[in-house]
Amino acid sequence: MPISRRTIIAAGTASAAMGAAASSAQAAPVLGLDAAGLGVRPNFPNDQTQALQRAIDRAAQARTTLILPAGTYRAAELRLPPHAKIAGTRGATRLSLAHARSLFVSERAESIDLSGLVIDGLKAKPAEGRALVHIAQGNDIRLTDCAIVNAGRNAIALEGCSGAVTGCLIEDAGDGALFALDSTGLRIAGNVIRRSGNNGIQVWRSAFGDDGTLVTDNRIEETRADAGGDGPYGNAISVYRAGNVIVRGNRIDKCAFSAVRGNSASNIQISGNICTRMSEVGIYSEFSFEGAVITGNTVDGATIGISVTNFDVGGRLAVVQGNLIRNLLPVGNGNGIGIGIAADSVVTGNVIEIAPTAGIEVGYGPYLRDVIVSDNVMRTVGVGVAVSVVKGSGNALITDNLIAEARNGAVVGMEWDKRVTGDMTKDGTGRFAHVTLSGNRVR
């Protein structure tokens, strides 16, 4: 067809009309279904579980979002089918638990979104093992900008789930704030967690295996250990049997036990966390793990700053580098140690200040093998480096460290908890051929 002025004008007019239609569509998007138009009443005093369930099911079937206006809604055991999406007005749309059960439950569903909701458990306790929000075998689960408060047990439980929990506030959980079991690709990021009764974030597996959960940029405060015990509870972040987990950039304050506790967690990376006011070990990698990278953390106030231990049951292989550790607290005749290390590891570039027992403890009894301690700064310590000299101990290379104000010696040989040598930087290693010293500066 020949091009003329008339065809150009016609084409331009059609194009303008299409652009106007597109702009109109963009200006008025379909937001979802309004729950108020489906029989759900804000601030209605009675239990609205049935009306809410009908609205949730209808929106999910339509593959759209259910919009809950500001107000309070009483409900319990709301079931989230595949593609359930519920959005409220952040801080103003409140779901209060009507009976001692979970408030939201789901099993074998995908593409679930909860956003902008206050979910209030009112301290009621559901059945043992049930959480206020309990989702099992879910794919692409997302909780965003929600407040989950006053859970009688765990606030959130995700079993066998992928997805993300981001930007949420979790306060006053009776047990844990967030319990993730057997995750399949989970991100826990940017949340604020306060006053958990036992643990803050738990990343656990029912058996040893790859997990890969990312725990990043959360703020976790005042974690208690109401259930007691010697360490399973009272941790801001607990990683158990879960491999390849990253714990990064979290701000952690005031724990009954540890800020980050990796138990049998291989290839764990713990980096860039700021941890203050711990009542036990600040950062722990323990029991039968292989591989821990602990770098760039600050620990201020703990009985032991960083402990990488349990070579007796296979705990081995670590890099502990570039951490700042200070204000260690003695408890009884023990602790007050900056870093404890055991096997197949490098400890380098750390700064330790005020450790009443030792800056760095290398091995315990015969549980020592192939450890390098180099280029660390230790100030105001009982012993700079306490190295095991018990028969059967493996090699330790202690080089180029700066040790200042070591009250009981810069490098001292230990038999278990007993000092059995003088300062080896002055007297030499003597009969202990497994210990090599060089280039250390002491003042």
Image (spheres, rainbow, N blue to C red):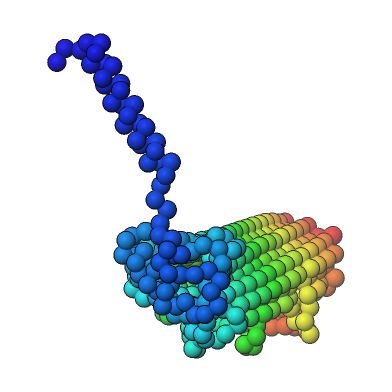
Q: Position of residue 167 (x, y in %)?
A: 56, 60
- Please give left or right for residue 105 compared with residue 13 in the image: right
- Please give left or right for residue 324 compared with residue 286 in the image: right
Using the image as rendered, state which of residue 30 and residue 398 is in the foreground: 30
Q: Position of residue 9 (x, y in %)?
A: 28, 16
Using the image as rendered, state which of residue 266 and residue 136 is in the foreground: 136
Q: Position of residue 329 (x, y in %)?
A: 78, 75
Residue drawn at (69%, 83%) of the image: 416
Residue drawn at (14%, 15%) of the image: 1
Using the image as rendered, state which of residue 314 and residue 392 is in the foreground: 314
- Please give left or right for residue 378 compared with residue 225 in the image: right
Task: Work out whether residue 221 can be spotted.
Answer: yes
Using the image as rendered, state which of residue 110 and residue 209 is in the foreground: 110
Looking at the rendered structure, the number of numbered marks drawn on it comes to: 0
Residue drawn at (51%, 62%) of the image: 69
Residue 302 occupies quadrant:
bottom right
Instruction: Judge whether 412 appears above or below 405 on screen.
Output: below
Instruction: Judge whether 323 appears above or below 334 on screen.
Output: above
Residue 85 occupies quadrant:
bottom left
Specify the quadrant that holds the C terminus.
bottom right
Instruction: Judge whether 78 appears above or below 216 on screen.
Output: below
Q: Position of residue 120 (x, y in %)?
A: 57, 75
Task: Work out whether residue 317 can be spotted.
Answer: no
Residue drawn at (43%, 72%) of the image: 52
